[in-house]
Amino acid sequence: MVFVAFFVILQLKSKTKTNMRKALLTFCLLTAGLLPLIADNITVGGQQRSYNVYAPKNLGEGRPLLIFCHGYNQDAGWMQNSEFKNDNVSMEAVCDTAKFVVVFPNGIDRAWDTGGDRDINFIKAIIEKMVTQHKIDRNRIYLGGFSMGGMLTYNAINKMSDIIAAFVSCSGPSVITPKTGLRPIPLLHIQGTADNWGGVQPALNPWIKHNGCSTTDKVINNYNGFSGAKLHIWGPGNDGVEVRLIELKDKGHWICKEPQVYTGKEIWNFCKNYSLNRTKPSVSITSPKAGLSYTSFAPSGTATFPDIAITANADDPNGTIEKVEFFDGNTLLATCTAKPYKATLTGVKSGTHTLKVVATDNDGETSSASVSVTLSAPQSLALASQSQFKEGGCIPTGWVTYDSSEKRVGYSNGFSQGCRILQLTGASKSFSYGLYFRNINGTKHAGYAKYGLADAGATLTLDPGHYVLKYKACNWNREEFSPLEFAIETRSGTTIASTTYTPTVNIGNKVDNSFTGVTEQQFEFDITTQGNYVIAAYADAAEWSDGMIGGLTLTAKSYVATGITTLPTVDSTTDNDAIYDLSGRRVSRPTRDGLYIKNGKKMVIR
């Protein structure tokens, strides 16, 4: 390179324009093979747009294309030269080995249109030009981005899933959710825990659900031998796609360039598994839906669960489906060789069951899909624990809200107004996440949050017994406070027991307000008939009344079958009216409503 520069300097000393032009041409020819990246431009929507492109030598035809977009206030050169380079490897080296083309586009004013079509059209134009110039395989085109470029990538999923085979976002979480009818989407997200980490899981959850992936992730610690990395895998879901997250401990807002976890290589290793030109069969589980839970409160060892019907769809793009197999874990449940594809899981035991369906086509190729269902028989159940209330802007699985105008059923997310989980960020707070619900028109029971309704993905079965519901609740925007009603109901809406509580804390209509002093309340009730029940919280019968649930725990204190192991002897002449509670203690006069034993028989006192 030094020789080339010296040669050109000598040539430029010539006083003739002809010699100068010849010298410049010679310089360009001599250095063309030394430049790792070529800058180019294209006109889109009447505006000239630019990008950098790298194509390996001896690329050949029918090779993949990766388009990767820079962050806000950056450009293509910065993305390629600063963020994708270290002392050991570069993106060009990955391209040289795997033989694919990479393009780094430039945003307008170093930014991207993360909600509209301006930059979507730009990416489409780049694809067409790369297909023409490098004979790119249209079935293996991948899109990713860093920061704002990652947000653009999420925007592109709903608009370019027929063009892009897999998507990658680095440090760019988004609130965009899947549109109706969208195919299963392979998605890789990479983020540091010191970089808006709280927004990552909420961004991934709707895609995990959309893909039919298990909501429980497989975790690989010390990923690739790097103690600062953890890999989370959800799936395979429908069509065998996965959602993956590389968690980088204490990393900030930058691209990871560690030798063990080099971002460019991780992107390629994920994307190369996916193509739009499928030859493998597609398969999806239509029932049960992912995240289904069935909770049965019953005496130890007596809880029973209903049979679970499993149904699936399967087809093959270039042949026929030979068989569809249904598994509970590794146990084969059924094999279907023709539609309808269905099986039944019987004699279900408590625990988490991974239900898997494997479709095999006439070429022997297979695809699988799986969902997880959880069946539990607890003595206590934290319905509003950190494991469930941990994502702002959503309605959690198992919950339904109604505000007299709109009904929302979990799991659903992307809400910025109305009933939803709010993340409270004040310096001092009684809880970090709360379920906000309201009553707009003031009609009684027209504003509520309920757990256990049939369409929300959770079933709560209670055996006869004595229960305690503990809860933390306050108002959201009621300076003078408004009462809340907590009730236990049947699924048909019949109230079994209820209590009214007037909060003493109002958050003040801002998530960053500090609030303290929300104390745990206790509500005891009895169940006399085994069945499916609903926990309900109602806002007051007043316009724009509201409530916030920050903690809710249900505990079975005793059961009819176990509360009394031996009934005390009753003297029919002197002790005919003796009454005993469910713990076997004699009570001369019950002080509260509930279930009691009299003359060896159950009775309810109200």
Image (cartoon, rainbow, N blue to C red):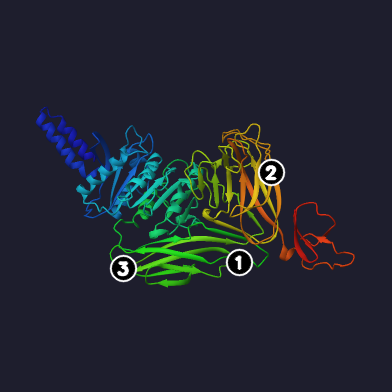
Kindly check if marks 3 and 1 are in contact, taking CB atoms under 8 A apart as contact: no
Kind of residue sitting beneath label 3: Thr
* Helix, strand or loop for disc 1: loop
- Which label lies toward us, 3 or 1? 1
Q: Quadrant of the N terminus?
A: top left
Kind of residue sitting beneath label 1: Thr
Residue 320 tag number: 3
Residue 352 spot, x, y in % from top left: 54, 62
Residue 304 tag number: 1
Residue 451 spot, x, y in % from top left: 58, 51
Kind of residue sitting beneath label 2: Thr
Q: CA distance from mark 3 to mark 1?
A: 39 Å
Please tell me which of labels 2 and 3 falls first in the chain: 3
The residue located at (46%, 69%) in the rendering is 343
Disc 2 target residue: 500
Estimate how packed mark 1 is, as few (under 14), some (14 to 19) or many (20 or more) residues with alpha carbons within 10 Å: some
Q: Nearer the viewer, residue 29 or 304?
A: 304
The residue located at (59%, 40%) in the rendering is 443
Relative to residue 77, is residue 229 drawn left or right?
A: right
Please tell me which of labels 3 and 1 falls first in the chain: 1
* Helix, strand or loop for disc 3: loop
Q: Nearer the viewer, residue 578 or 582?
A: 578
* Helix, strand or loop for disc 2: strand
Residue 228 spot, x, y in % from top left: 49, 50
Residue found at the far top of this picture: 15
Residue 332 to residue 493: above or below: below
